[in-house]
Amino acid sequence: MQRDNVRPNNNCTGMGAQTTIKYAAIDFETTYHKSQVDIGSLGVWHYLRHPRCTIYMVSVFTEAGTFVGHPADFDFESIRDCEWISHNAAFDQEVYIRLQELELAPDWMPRKWHCSANMTAFFGASERNLADAARVHLGLDLSKDVRDAMNKKTWDDIRRDEAFHEEVKSYALRDAEVCYALWMAKKDQWPAREQELSALTMNQVRRGLPCDQDYLNASIQNLSVAAFEAVHRLPWADGDEEKALSDILFAAECRKLGIEPPRSKAKGSLEALDWEEQHPEINWIADRRTYLRANLLRTKLLTMKDRIRDDGRIHFGVKYFGAHTGRWSGDTKLNVQGLTKETLHGANQRRVICVQDPSKKLIIADLSQIEPRVLAWVVGDWPFLEICRTQSVYEAHARLTLGWKGGVLKKENPEMYALAKARVLGLGYGSGPTTFREFAKIYGVNLTPQEAKKTVNDFRTKEYRVVDFWNQLDEDLKLSARREEDYVVPLPSGRDLIYRDCHYAKTSTGKTNVKARMSGGRWGFTWGSKIAENVIQAIARDVFCECLLRLEAAGLQSIFTVHDEVILEVDRSVTTHEVQDIIKINPDWMPDVPLDSEAEESDYYKK
């Protein structure tokens, strides 16, 4: 392992020097009852405008004083000179905007609004909630009994019960005070760059997604028709969608015709394929599949439609530092990290995101093959990186490990190019022969079990630096497990990748392996090559974040990101070359890796 490339870096500092800043922790309470009004189903924007939703309380904690009561009774001007803090600030910002619409809050925003939940996620507390953050970072054990009781009552219920009303006020003010204490305890350790990314994430949510409503409505209609027709082609269903999916009724209909039903109807299963070949006149498996796929995509599009705001843009949720590596993750049932690519019956989920302002366009750009480049840098494979200055990572790999001596590999030997691509993308993190064989099929590379084993062994022999990297991480992890302590991998950007509470445990197969707690409180077994994947993805994320902040500083607004890809909504005059030039700038802490970028412009999201 190249320790020079994975080490602490102190070029990012927090806000400790700004001792004159005044802070106000602010927390809103709203009606929440899952059977009546639910954020997960409605999304935040529509939840706050639902007739059953009431913003009934605000609690504020500052060093100068406190307040808890109805928002209409609070003087927001009293904290205008403060930077605000909330635990889940993206939600509280939306509440404040709703109060502005109701003329219960002034028409200005605080100069900065920090999120202590995002800060907690960065430091790897088990979960993002305030109780867990308080336990991990302040040593406090907060009871959520009042919150649980609140979730079963309406605001009118709370207000009528005077004693419980006072409990709610005390609970709300306690949360604001704990949020304040948490911020003051950890803010100086939260890098300024990460604070900017947290704020940017909340800004993306507030910007929303441009939407082609005509296309969205037509797509929903097309899918509805396709699903309806597919169900009505199934003789046992009588147009009933539940009956259409009944395996018992499917089997009974088969036996009416004197044929055995297939043992599996799953897409791609050999049993289903064989059955369809034997009975080409019967399209029941295909019709069921058509219904399932059309209905799934229709459900996703209906969620998008339900999230359209009054300004015509789609409100969505996204979590800063939602994944263990620091990457973003989806939220509130509309996951922009995982929008489907396929077009089905003329409907495409990505195509819905479309500019409506004729002066704007989208630029979709990414860091090309960033993970293989970072992996080579971490392990010190300089010959590979040197070739990458002028050629693709796949051609560089072929020249160094597959004996390619010719010209442009992709043009002259597409089969070797496909194999090189499969090797680079599929073997860097410890895949074995069986897994690699299936992975290679994605790129059109069909290998026998023996060929897959030979390929894996060849890769590990020639890419010995990578294997050494896995082994070093595995040794360090096992040492932490023996000591039953956290395993911390310092990253070159200055942050740490943390695996908490490492220890040995039995797997479901009875083997002993290292188990650790990841971000979000998730427990899992891990090992050296898996940690290598996390490390490389985390570093790639940090490189991408530098690009993202530079784009914003240049006035190029992102509406969302997907891993190493950014989707920008920009003026028509902005060129893809401008965007690529910004993206390809190296971070100060990683100056010697040749970065590359791909970008295209479009009126709608595609890729």
Image (cartoon, grey):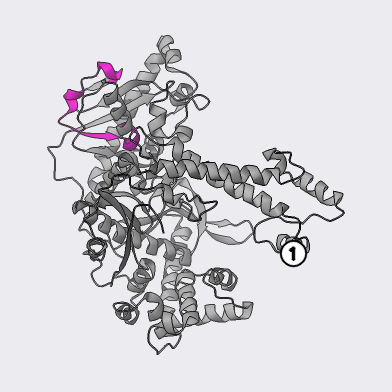
Which residue range is magenta in the image? 68-92
Q: Nearer the viewer, residue 401 or 129?
A: 401
Left or right for 595, reference 393:
left
Q: Residue at x 45, y 35 (%)?
A: 306
Q: Is residue 433 above or below residue 153?
A: below
Q: Amino acid at mark 1?
A: Glu
Q: Is residue 150 above or below residue 487?
A: above
Left or right for 515, reference 56:
right
Q: Report helix, strand or loop for mark 1.
A: helix
Q: Which corner quadrant holds the N terminus?
A: bottom left
Q: Nearer the viewer, residue 161 or 369?
A: 369
Query: Residue 181: percent from the left, percent from the top?
Result: 28, 34
Q: Residue at x 18, y 36 (%)?
A: 111
The residue pinned by badge 1 equals: 277
Query: Residue 473: percent from the left, percent from the top?
Result: 42, 67
- Answer yes or no: is residue 389 visible: yes
- Answer yes or no: is residue 127 visible: no
Q: Nearer the viewer, residue 373 or 259?
A: 259
Q: Residue at x 29, y 52 (%)?
A: 361
Question: Is residue 263 found inside the magenta-colored segment of the image?
Answer: no
Q: Residue at x 35, y 67 (%)?
A: 368
